[in-house]
Image (spheres, rainbow, N blue to C red):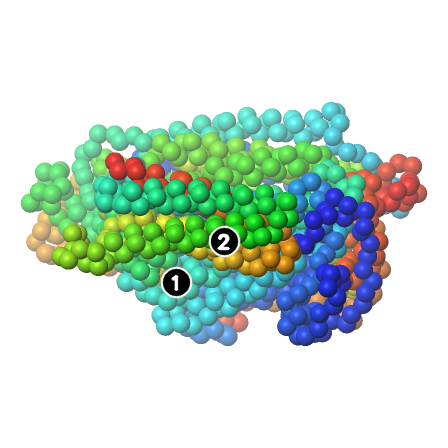
Amino acid sequence: MSETTAATATVQEHAHEEHHEMSFWEKYIFPTDHKMIGLQYMFTGMFMAAVGGYFAYAFRMQLAFPGMDVPLFGQVTPQIYNMLITNHGTIMIFWVAMPVLIAGFGNFLIPLMIGCDDMVFPRINRLSYQIFFVSTVVLLLSFFVKGGGFGGAWTAYPPLSSVPEYNLTNWGSSLWIVAVALEIIAFLLGGINFVTTTMNSRAPGMKMMDIPIVIWMINIAVIMFMASVGPLIAGAVMLFMDQRIGTTFFLPAGGGDPVLWQHLFWFFGHPEVYVVLFPTLGLVADVITTFSRKKLWGYRTILYTTIATGGLAFVVWAHHQFIAGIDPRMANVFVVTTLLISIPIAEVMFCYIATLYGGSIRFTVPMLWALGFLMTFLLGGVTGIYLGASGLNIYFHDSYFVVAHFHYTFFPITIIGMFGALYYWFPKMFGRHLNEFWGKVHFWGTLIPFNGIFLPLFLLGMAGQHRRIYNYEHFPDLASPDLQGLRVFATASLVIMLLFQIPFLINFFGSMFRGRKAEPNPWKANTLEWIVPSPPPHGNFKELPSVYRGPYEYSVPGNREDYWPQNMPDRN
Amino acid sequence: MIEYFVENASSYGGEIDWLFDLITYMVGFWFLLTFGAMVYLLLKFRYREGVPAKYITGERHNEKRWIHWPHNIIIVFDVVLIAGAIWVWVLVKQTMPPKDDAIRVIAQQWSWSFIHSGPDGKLDTEDDIKTVNDLHVEVNKVYHFELQSRDVIHNFAVPAFRLRQDMIPGRSIAGWFEPTLPGTYDIQCAEMCGHGHGIMSAAVTVHTPESYQQTMAAIRDGTYESDYLRRLNGPPTPIPGTVKASDPDSYATLLAKSF
Amino acid sequence: MTLREGGSPPRTFAWKILMTHSPIATRRTVTGIPTGRLAVWWVLTSEVFIFGGLIMCFVLYKLNGAPGFEQASMTNTPAGAFNTFVLLTSSLTIVLAHAASERRDLKKTFNYIWFTIFGGLVFMVVKFYEYTTKIFPEWYHTPATHEPITILSNVFWSFYFTATGLHALHVFGGMVIMGMISMDVLKGRNLQRVELIGLYWHFVDIVWIFLFPLLYIANF
């Protein structure tokens, strides 16, 4: 930041052609290159997804076949079961969804898409990943300390989470909080970098409405994260002191209030849903426009309704606590805000679907994933209405209906939409194509079993099955063989879905080295990352580009080609 | 539709089931419409040789109405849904019909204590009857309950009554229900409460007036046999052709059978 | 790789890990706000929500009548008022440092930064005095005038020590960073950072302006 001549800097811009060979350590372990940091985040996220999936496998097996040894895991005791579900949730949200979608794709795409050579603070970017890495290690270590990992659900409601005598995981619960806090700090650092980069370092000519929607979405998500996570950090400090020093912030016996934590947590927890949703919406927008060769329907409408959704998301948190002992009159306010949020988010969905109108749709593998995202997320979205309606929430609170609903939102967001983006940008990341056939096998092998897992859970939720129970044999109404059959079906689907990830992994790592070579712009897309070689070199652009139009100018009448790169001054 | 899965045994269960149906119809309409529109567009506008895509910004007035009309209809639907949701909510959580009897529910890690008010209908008197994991109520009587917790947050959940309410340590949370269907039903703890969360069950038995008197007398004499334990130890009636949870089969057969 | 003036330093392993090129991205200012200042504003935004959450919790507990809040009268209001004065003064000196740095008056910038650090130090000493009078009353009066008050005494004192402790941590962090910046100032490098630390220091000041009336004055 030694530059005081900022005003003249744009004039002096030129690419640096000084090649000095970077050592392995510089390039892969302590990189400052945004692309490599993005990939680091992504690979860490993939590793953690494997851990989270393994946990899901273990506890689903326990639910389907209670009390039996789970192959490749062992006995699932109640204590281990609680640890598994708690950390499954924590990992999938904090260590998979956020690092892959925001940090991974954000780091990789932001500088490329806005046409600059790196993030504004490359070293802070590196620090962000390093803190994140430490948080990962802390979380993994917490499973092996005396007493086992934290088992008080990812919401960590006190007093259970704050008193070691209640949760019986003295060290696990504290390490869990430390890991989450470190992860949050890493994302705050990364987020500041993202927002500053997008605000200040866009290519000349790139106006606000020329920014690809995915960059908008990631930035809205980051700002929402910043605004929502602060109170949770304060709460985490208080909870940590309750655990370790013995203060009574959340302990009624000492004058504290356990419900306050719920407010702090959900004030963060609900916007967090949109924090992970928005990046995927953006990624999917790029995929859909490219493969239907269409301009995005209502760019501004999508942008404004997204911002409206983000704003509304801050005033709906108490719908997670309708029956948690808050004043019942408050529920009437929150049911209104909660159901109102359906309006802007439905409008975004309509715009996406309308984008298909008049297109020339190519069902490539990324497009399949993107459409799969829209279809499954649609079901996830509409089932939210049941839970937001306060009267019905009395029945559905903490039931499997909730589990099915949020998996129908989170799974499309984190897995289906993410895979679409991965198949789409894989050529840019590694310079080679993924195999099409195995990509399609992977798609159907994931989408169909996914519905097989979670559709039965809706029915189980309607049957009154509540969450976080290691064995339903203690609840005679729920132990009926019919319901057990549904549980077995869900588990079988999960196993199949996990098995279908094996061809993907082979395809992924195989194609990285042996795949078909990719030219710079294999999909004939408009955004700036496609004008550089695949993979982009250090410093990204040989000549830093100027921008002349928006990112979605496909099939413009009068052009020879049906795409029109943002940096192309003349007709195509 | 919930009543196909769990019988409705309380006076307001019907309203909650009605709300579920209402939402299903409204949401189902939108789901099918949107899903159908998407499938139609995908088929209609799939790639054909020599047919270029149209250039539509979606920002002109006559294009925007394709978004704005559904948007306006959603607002109308939302108003109906909000009205329905609040109506049921007020009925269950914000109104207290006059009470016939009172009970106190005390949760702790990981069991339930129920204090029945006894013949005088008042709590904290000498004729209170305390049971563990067994709640007895009389059909068609309005019960006011007090929920208390000794340690962490629990949740008093009776699916058959369509009732769930968190229990916060340090507070006493009031509410009501009116059982309408005799029988024995599960009570669940529906909030994560530690290692034994999965075994924290209890049973509520809805009695006819006669059997209620008999049971209460039996509890006083000490000759009472717990409904809870009877249910817990008794085998669930198996339906032919389905997989039994305790089947000592191999995983391979169990998985294969599930299809 | 652009290197700063002064030629290329030896490329040891540590150099490779710690130093990097400064990308063109850092030098662009599409908004017209220098990148460093923009980033500091975002840092402060996220800090506002952290302290905001903590203060909001405190206010909620107070309104709900949590036990121990009547003991707010036991806080040392004169010491708090003195600390307010010290912090405000140090805010003034950092503004003067910024003004001096704009004129590239390195000597004065350096001096004003150290005035500010001194202000922070006085603040910490008073804070230390306050804490010890609460935790170790026997140090000051024998026999002690009151029971030892610690973070565990009740919810009010938990908040008192948490909030002021977190704030003191920020003061300390600011002092360390100012010390580092003052070293750069002597060499005439990175003068724009004086403004950035000034922004941060004002923020720390404002947090105290909120904490002081809540914890020391509002004895209801």
Q: Secondary structure at mark 1?
A: helix
Residue B184 visible to the viewer = no
Split into 4 quadrants, where in the image is the N terminus of chain C? bottom right
Q: Is residue C109 left or right of residue A297?
A: left
Q: Which chain does tag 1 point to?
A: A
Q: Which of the 4 image quarters holds residue B161?
A: top left
List x then y, in percent, for residue A375.
64, 46
* Amino acid found under the numbered disc labelled 2: Trp
Q: For residue C114, which numbered disc appears in the image? A: 2
Vertical comparison of B64 with C124: above or below: above
Q: Which of the 4 image quarters holds residue A161?
A: bottom left
Q: At x 13% / y 57%, what residue is drawn?
A: C143
Foreground: A300 or B116?
Answer: A300
Foreground: A223 or B189?
Answer: A223
Q: CA distance from mark 1 to mark 2?
A: 39 Å
* Amino acid found under the numbered disc labelled 1: Ser
Vertical comparison of A334 with A120: above or below: above
Q: Is residue A28 left or right of residue A49?
A: right
Residue B229 visible to the viewer = yes
Q: Secondary structure at mark 2?
A: helix
Q: For residue A174, which numbered disc appears in the image? A: 1
Q: Are marks 1 and 2 on the same chain?
A: no
Q: At x 72% / y 42%, what residue is drawn?
A: C30
Q: At x 16% / y 52%, what residue is drawn?
A: C145
Split into 4 quadrants, where in the image is the C terminus of chain C? top left
Foreground: A84 or A200?
Answer: A200
List x then y, in percent, for residue A484.
44, 59
Q: At x 35% / y 44%, what residue is drawn?
A: C82
Mark 1 vs mark 2: give the one in front. 2
List x then y, in percent, for residue A154.
44, 56
